Image (tube, rainbow, N blue to C red):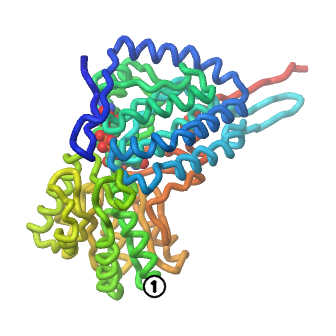
Amino acid sequence: MTMIRCISPVNGEVYAERPAMTLEMARQAVAHARQAQKGWARRPLEERVKLVLAGVARLNEMVDEVVPELAWQMGRPVRYGGEFKGFNERSNYVASIAADALTSIVVEESDRFERRIEREPHGVVFVIAPWNYPYMTAINTIAPALMAGNAVILKHASQTILVGERMVRAFIEAGVPADVFQNLFLDHDTTAALIAAKSFDFINFTGSVEGGRSIERAAAGTFTGLGLELGGKDPGYVMEDADLDAAVDTLMDGATYNSGQCCCGIERIYVHESLYDAFVEKSVAWVSNYKLGDPLDPETTLGPMANKRFAANVRHQIADAVSKGAKALIDPKLFPEDDGGAYLAPQILVDVDHSMEFMREETFGPAVGIMRVKSDAQAIELMNDSRYGLTASLWTKDAERAGRIGRELETGTVFMNRADYLDPALCWTGVKETGRGGSLSVLGFHNLTRPKSYHLKKATA
Ligand code: NAP
């Protein structure tokens, strides 16, 4: 029997494990979901929305277990209180727009014709979720998919193996039928075999580019709809008229919060030459205030990375950049808790350029590169010099200028004077190798349903 294991970054030991389901067991679970979905979709929308929100409320009641469990599984310090703020905000927002988002488009309602486009649930939606924000990334699809009348099968990351189990428990205790929302413990081969057998009507995958490729390959020829929310290398650009303190505060938080393990974390910053020195100096002071350590200690502000292999990748990128001329500004002596394993000190690199892997590939750790720029044109060119495109964070007092620059950027979201935030009213989407499709907002509902056209000609005279 294959076991799926979470090795805790806190102490490097197995924190939780579950046996992987066999393909046969998984097929049966999907068959039950398919059967249950029809009855779920026939229930009134208000009832489905109410039950999903009841599941969200039930999960909130589990806060005292959820928060330390998250710290053990992926290292986020308990002082941040889990992911409830975003989890609740997203759930409540999609609930508030569900009726409008799913309403029919009526083209004609006359004595002679009824012509309209209705939205139908796909059927069984498969959600594959990552460990970095294990509740928030999963709920982006689960809440609207269930509200729209789909059944949902969730496969969560091995690193956060308990999250799917807990979410499903909360939703079922709140009254969502057990077959309608199921968590399955699946290894990669079984996941691919289910997808290749066309078990699902829509798949949302959130994770790495390589993972996304594997899912796309498994789905090839099945015509299953795919939403792919993949990696990023998100830039910040600080213009000469920016509010410097606000830019430092938001961009450094965006680069390092959650140990830099945010899909829309800031990974590279371009600063106008007039503000460059001050920006770098203030950023070093900002980052130096972190207290790295045990995430279960309420004093800790920066936990370990989720796995020592992720930290090893960050160390490799930093060392490679330094060997090519980059300068590391954070003194490691400030962070004696850095153990060469999962506990990693934050870092700021200057004298970087795009020949370095550190400035091109996703780092996904508490390290950021800062470059000096002379003009918008140069900043735009550098920001677009990436195979990814999730968000870009522009710092200026001039919204017209931000709009103009935004139109030149190859990205899913343009921020002005903010970063690293997912607004549930807007479509969460990426370009290039960051993926395709979109979640949340009214468009998220559209992606989780299909249009059906009704062209009804009334009795002819
Ligand atoms: P990952 O290794 O690709 O894993 C994501 C999920 O996919 C996990 O449940 C994983 O299961 C599963 N998976 C990966 N490869 C698979 C395969 N070949 N077959 C079946 N399942 C597979 O990514 P991660 O390390 O968890 O997450 C970090 C990445 O996610 C970063 O690149 C980050 O940028 C990206 N991300 C993007 C967004 C966005 O909105 N664009 C949001 C969050 C994260 P196992 O854990 O069992 O391997």
Give the mark count: 1
Disc 1, ligand 1: is the CB inside 8 Å?
no
Residue at 45% x, 41% y is: 66
Q: Quadrant of the C terminus?
A: top right
Residue 87 as seen in the image, left or right of residue 358: right
Q: Residue at x 44, y 28 (%)?
A: 224
**Residue ID at (26%, 45%):** 9
Residue 110 on image: x %, y %:
87, 33
Badge 1 crowding class, 10 Å Cα cut-off, few under 14, some 14 to 19, many 20 or more, is: few
User: Quarter of the image containing the N terminus?
Assistant: top left
Q: Viewed as shown, does residue 78 lie left or right of 52? A: left
Task: State the image quarter where residue 248 is shown.
Answer: bottom left
- For this rendering, which residue is in front, 399 or 2? 2
Relative depth, front residue between 142 and 123: 142
Q: Position of residue 82 (x, y in %)?
A: 46, 49
Q: What residue is shown with label 1? A: 241
Q: Specify the quadrant of the image occupied by residue 234.
A: bottom left
Point out the residue furthest to the left here. 323
Q: Is residue 3 visible?
A: yes
Q: Nearer the viewer, residue 357 or 458?
A: 357
Q: Secondary structure at mark 1?
A: loop
Using residue 11 as the reference point, say whether residue 325 is left or right of it: left
Q: Quadrant of residue 278?
A: bottom left
- Going by the numbered disc 1, the residue's amino acid type is Asp
Percent of width and height locating residue 380: 36, 70
Quadrant observed for ligand 1 in the rendered image? top left
Where residue 2 appears, as percent x and y from the top left, is 25, 21
Horizontally, residue 47 falls left or right of residue 406, namely right
Q: Is residue 216 visible?
A: no
Q: Is residue 180 above or below residue 372?
A: above
Q: Residue at x 34, y 62 (%)?
A: 256
